[in-house]
Amino acid sequence: MNVKSLIRRNYNKQPEVDFPDYKSSIFRAPKNKKILFPSSDSEILGPIFNKNIIGELDNNLTLNFSKNKNSPLGHKIIVYGTVHDQFSNPIEGALIEIWQANSAGKYLHNNDKNSAPIDPNFAGCGRCLTTPRGYYEFLTIQPGPYPYPNRGIEWRPMHIHFSIFGKSFGQRLITQMYFEGDPLIKYCPMVNSIADEKAKKSLIGALDTSRSNTQNLLAYKFDIVLRGVKQTYFENRKEGL
């Protein structure tokens, strides 16, 4: 057996599944114990992601949905970082997909009941593949916070959803990136369902002023660690990719 497979996972860093302050968790929390079931051939064997599926503007959310190259409302930001395993080895060829609200806090989705306006030049979704160094980068718009019904009306902090695929759809992890300095983070029940403070901080993208000054936009660095003691918290799977 490979000794690298024996690293113990820290389940104390995971959120409470049934967290009353986050009202939806009461209804979503499973009532029965987890069960294991084998993967099918389609989950194990494919599809294999490669650069042929990526369009020229897939990682540029300021242009990939714009009409006549009109810019979306809001200020532009770079979101970048690396994907590594627990031994700091870069993960090449991971498919990263992101989705987010626009600058007014509105998703381009029929179920979003927020009264904020839709931006006709912004869909809020993009994707890219990591490089041999595990690097990824997106150009997008800073998302706005938005109200949602929880304990009355509460506000979600600014955030971007991340989906990270391995070699197939069966290897998928989901998380969220928050923004350094956002005062709403400490009030968010979704964030506070994670008791471990280090795990919370792993979800905050760090403002990078060295890149922010080069193109008159802000830059945030968000590194993703798949497993081990420094693992990024993932919503859908505790054990990592």
Image (cartoon, rainbow, N blue to C red):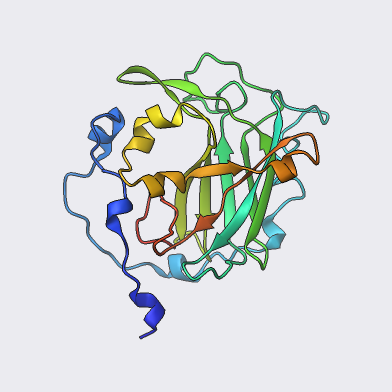
In the picture, the quarter occupied by the C terminus is bottom left
How far across and how far down the image is residue 200, in percent? 41, 44
User: Does residue 67 lie above or below 115 as drawn?
Assistant: below
Q: Does residue 56 appear in this view?
A: yes
Residue drawn at x 42%, y 70% is 41
Q: In the rendered picture of this protein, how many numbered marks are placed on residues?
A: 0
> In the image, 152: left or right of 164?
left
Which residue is at the far left?
A: 32
Give how far across and how far down residue 176 sits, in percent. Answer: 48, 42
In the image: residue 81, left or right of residue 149: right
Q: What's the residue at 50%, 66% (across, down)?
A: 85
Q: Position of residue 173 (x, y in %)?
A: 45, 54
- Which image quarter holds the N terminus? bottom left
Q: Height in image: 148 above or below 122?
A: above
Task: Tell me if residue 143 comes above or below residue 147 in the rendering.
Answer: below
Q: Kindly give the residue lying farthest to the bottom in the view shown.
A: 1
| Viewer-closest of 90 and 35 | 90
Identify the residue at the far front of this view.
210
Q: Residue at x 39, y 62 (%)?
A: 229
Kindly tell me whether residue 235 is visible in this rendering.
Answer: no
Task: Specify the quadrant of the image occupied by residue 5.
Answer: bottom left
